[in-house]
Amino acid sequence: IADPVIFGIYHPFLNNIGQMVATVLENRIHALLLTDSNAKLQHLVTQLEHLVAERTREISEALGKLEESERRLQVFIENAPVAIAMFDKGMHYMAASQRWLENYGLLGRPIIGLSHYEVSPDVPDLWREYHCRGLSGEPQEAMEDRFERSDGRIQWVRWSIKPWHDQNGQVGGIVLFTEDMTELRKTQESLLMASMIYSNTGEAMLVVNQKNEIVAVNPAFTTITGYGESEVLGRNPSVLSSGKQDKAFYQRMWEQLNATGTWRGEVVNRRKSGELYAEELMINTIFKKDGSVHRRVALFMDITEKRKREDLIWRQANFDMLTGLPNRHHLAEVAGREMMNAQRSQESLALLFVDLDRFKDVNDTLGHGAGDELLVEVTRRLKQCLRETDVVARLGGDEFVVILTQIRNTSAIDRLAESMLQSLSRPYTLNADKEQVYVTASMGIAVYPHDSSHYEELMSFADQAMYAAKDLGRNRFHYFTPALQAATQERLHLISDLNGALAAGQLQVYFQPIVELPTGRTRKAEALLRWNHPKRGMVSPDVFIPLAEESGLITSIGEWVFQQSLHWAARWNTQTAGGFQVSVNKSPIQLHERDNAEDRWPEALRLHGLEGHNLTVEITEGVLARFDAQTVHKLSKFRSAGIEVSLDDFGTGYSSLAYLKKFPIDYLKIDQSFVRGILTNDSDMALCEAMVVMAHKLGLKVIAEGIETPDHLYTMKRMGCDYGQGFLFARPMPAEAMDDWLKSQSS
Ligand code: C2E
Ligand code: MG
Ligand code: MG
């Protein structure tokens, strides 16, 4: 019907049949009518006219329909929500969608009928090739294709080329479809990433809807809380609640969430197993367009271990691990707080410095394990004596500090200090073998704000007072006094002066004869140190020797005394034909140090032409009290070199027979306080006699110190004492004077 209709009338006499058939064929005539009657012809013509009219109407109707459908197609294409264009065989635009025009910058340009390549000259060769293939009937498509645009931007495109066919089944052209996937791809990538993070992160996620019902949780949530997804979906997050936060806490949280949409903080929650855990929680809100809540997303991390570690670090930094008491560092903080409280309430506060007496002996003889046990027990007893508000801290070693709070009068301090002393002095049962140990403590007390309102100063005052308690015989407490402070200052000055004394030639060695009582001969002398202070005059060794010990200066000073003694011993030894002996005092500190006098001195003696028996080392009982293998070893070395050992000031310390048996000793020096007492005090007399007898039993010789009167001499001699030393014979004197004295004796 779309083809043109041609019809005509042929007169049989005008044309031959052959020509007519050719015409019919040529004109693609479908029907052929042969007739000889005009009437019939007329009829036929009328009929044909009808037919033609009808056909014409049909054609124009069909054409109208075609136009309509073409127009519809165009409209359809134009409005398609994708980029689509239809081309004919020559790649001329037949139709293009609005989106196409937009995408390719063709809006407003009349392009229908124009060649695609004219319109867009920059179409890449590859595309042209795709078009060709499409035009040859091969449909093509790609889901995602990467294109680099002329401006360098990378574009991801989904496209298809579909050939279209005419009614003869021939390819009439192609339909091109393209879609920019770049944005979509980005969104997909970030979605993918988000979901990967969601399921792989160690941070737990929990999503609730506006009704606060859980709608999603991730695997980390399950790991941390122990709840599987199915167990919590639809439930309220309060299933995790531990009760450790009060109502007010949650109220504040919700207030902030409602106001700002976010909340951040730390919460203690409970796992399914019932175990508590700490979490660092962050809540964010996703709002709907109308501003109402769509979802709330909670992210949290388990910080229990972190907290524990932090707590441990804090504990280690602030507490003593053995006793659990605050350490020196933490004490400063606690004391500061207590002082502020006291100030506010107009009360006093006592700071007690507690130092165990002879703790070192326990450590040395029973081992550190026992020492630790003792410290733990001391802690327990101290706490037991104190009130809830008081503080105990351990400074280290055997030093403790107690802070007594809310003090209104000193009698309260006295009472508490006394009860602590008593409690600490009770016997301690240590070690698996149930060893009983007796330990006492000395305490120094400084009062806030009476003595000072500064922590450091209070500590130093209490420390000084503690030393005063020790000096007074230990196992007691002593209050700080300004006089103590003055004494301490004085000591510090003296120590600093002593530092330069040796170099400044202020030190001098005096000698005091030791007389053989039965014969009256002098074959021994004791070297006694003197300090001629430029301002203070003669300072007693009883004052400065302890300072030298405390400051460590004793080592060099002691060595110097020895060298001086050697010099004179050599001289007097020659004068007395080889029988002279000089006594040198040796401080306990010297024997405990790594100072190896026992190795060096025998050689030094030899260099001066002396032998071992020309020297005596005087030690005090204190040395023996700290029984240790090292001391015995050192003393034995002296003795194996022929050097003799004297036990000085016997009777003032522990006076234990056990020591005398254990240690290698040659002489016992009875302290002058006994000698002084023999004439007036019966018990001193008895003691002296006992000492002499006992010493002789042990094979020791006895030297009586402090013989001041002929009566002293007579009595000691009668007791059988071997040697005497004292003002009756001579006071300690400079070496030159001693030299003269010896000469006068021998003449
Ligand atoms: P010490 O070893 O017991 O010395 C004897 C002390 O008694 C000396 O006191 C001496 O002067 C004194 N003395 C002697 N005879 C009498 C007397 O008849 N009556 C009285 N009242 N006292 C008498 P000094 O010289 O003051 O020495 C005191 C202490 O200082 C010594 O006691 C000794 O322990 C120590 N010392 C002295 N020189 C040294 C030294 O070089 N090194 C060490 N480590 N200590 C020393
Ligand atoms: Mg002495
Ligand atoms: Mg003495």
Image: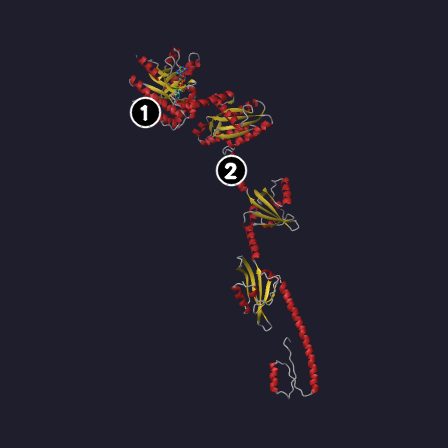
| Nearest the eye: 191 or 132 | 132
Instruction: Tell me the residue that label 2 is attached to.
Output: 313
Instruction: For ligand 1, tell me if the residue under mark 2 lies within 8 Å.
Output: no
Is residue 90 shown left or right of residue 743?
Answer: right
Using the rendered image of the protein, determine whether residue 112 is visible from the camera's viewpoint.
yes
| Nearest the eye: 85 or 275 | 85
Q: Which quarter of the figure has residue 168?
A: bottom right
Q: Tell me the element at label 2.
A: helix
As drawn, the label of residue 494 is none
User: Badge 2, how many Cα within 10 Å: few under 14, some, many 20+?
Assistant: few
Cα separation between marks 1 and 2: 55 Å
Name the kind of residue labelled 1 in the image: Ala
Q: Residue lying furthest bottom in this view?
A: 13
**Is 678 placed above or below 398 here?**
above
User: Badge 1, how many Cα within 10 Å: few under 14, some, many 20+?
Assistant: some
Q: Residue at x 60, y 86 (%)?
A: 18
Residue 589, image x and y in percent?
Answer: 41, 25
| Nearest the eye: 275 or 413 | 413
**Is 95 placed above or below 580 here?**
below
Name the kind of residue labelled 2 in the image: Ile
Numbered marks: total: 2
As drawn, the label of residue 604 is 1
Residue 743, image x and y in percent?
Answer: 31, 14
Is residue 72 shown left or right of residue 561?
Answer: right
Residue 427, image x and y in percent?
Answer: 49, 26
Using the rendered image of the protein, determine whether residue 276 is visible from the camera's viewpoint.
no
